Image (spheres, rainbow, N blue to C red):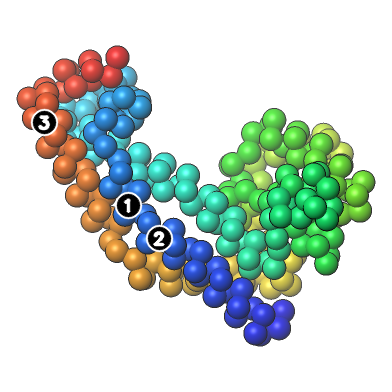
Amino acid sequence: MRGAETAQREKEALARITKFVENAENLIEKISAEDLIEKAGVNPYLAEALGMETIDEIVGFFLQRRVERTLSTSFGSVLEDSLRILLGGAKGKELGPKYGDWIKWWDIVIPDKKVAISAKSGPADMDKDQVKHFLVRAREAERKGFRVYLVFAYGKRASPLVAAYLEKGGLDPKKYLRIGKGVFREFLNDPAYHEKTLGIFFAAGKGAGNVFEAAEEKTRKITDEFNKRYAGNTKRMLADMF
């Protein structure tokens, strides 16, 4: 890529990531005590099996899992958007008027190269039904003259399930699958570009507030609330999960 074009893409990716990072504390702040009680945020069987004896232990363990899930759910689209920007692609949904409805399914499309990409975060983010659906969509896109790929933004190798079902469907993983460094090797001819990409995410994080402090403060608030509500009695708290 030309230097100016690369710099512009990196600037746009940084802006997209920064928007997420700046909102991370707000996402944590929105987590409530009721999320743990009413939305199955605490597994009472697991709490008992692990021998949790205090409300502090229960909240500390399950709230951290809730925070991770909350941020990870939002982050998936951020990672996909950033990858699309860095590869110089467009959303398939934006290209329907030109190519037809079939293209709307694809996460990243590079029109000048006639490339359509289904993007996932990591190699563990697909089950067999999703792989089978990819096979159907891949054949459809190839009939339209597009080269298709299944891409995982990070990782070293696909799960055996993914590779097996691609092969079973007649698609050679070596041709259709790109993971981690291989993504940038294929589309940017730079297998080390993941280091630059990590630097962009790091730069976005430097300007953010302290997410860990926000999570710790939320843990303290909900622990205090539950200790008051249940008078420190874990049995009463766990019974309230039913």
Q: Residue at x 69, y 32 (%)?
A: 128
* Residue 46 seen in the figure: no
Which label belongs to residue 227?
A: 3
Compared to residue 174, the image places residue 207 above or below, namely below
Q: Residues within 10 Å of mark 1 (few under 14, many from 20)?
A: few
From mark 3 to mark 1, how far is it between C-alphas?
24 Å
Which label belongs to residue 225?
A: none
- In this figure, which residue is indicated by the disc labeled 2? 21
Q: Residue at x 77, y 62 (%)?
A: 110
Image quarter of residue 192: bottom right
Q: What amino acid is at disc 2?
A: Val
Disc 1, SS:
helix
Quadrant position of the N terminus in the picture: bottom right
- In this figure, which residue is indicated by the disc labeled 1? 26
24 or 157: nearer the viewer: 24
239 or 189: nearer the viewer: 239
Lower position in the chain sequence, tag 2 or tag 1: 2
Q: Give the number of the mark in front: 3 or 1.
A: 1
Residue 45 relative to residue 17: left or right: left
Disc 2, SS:
helix
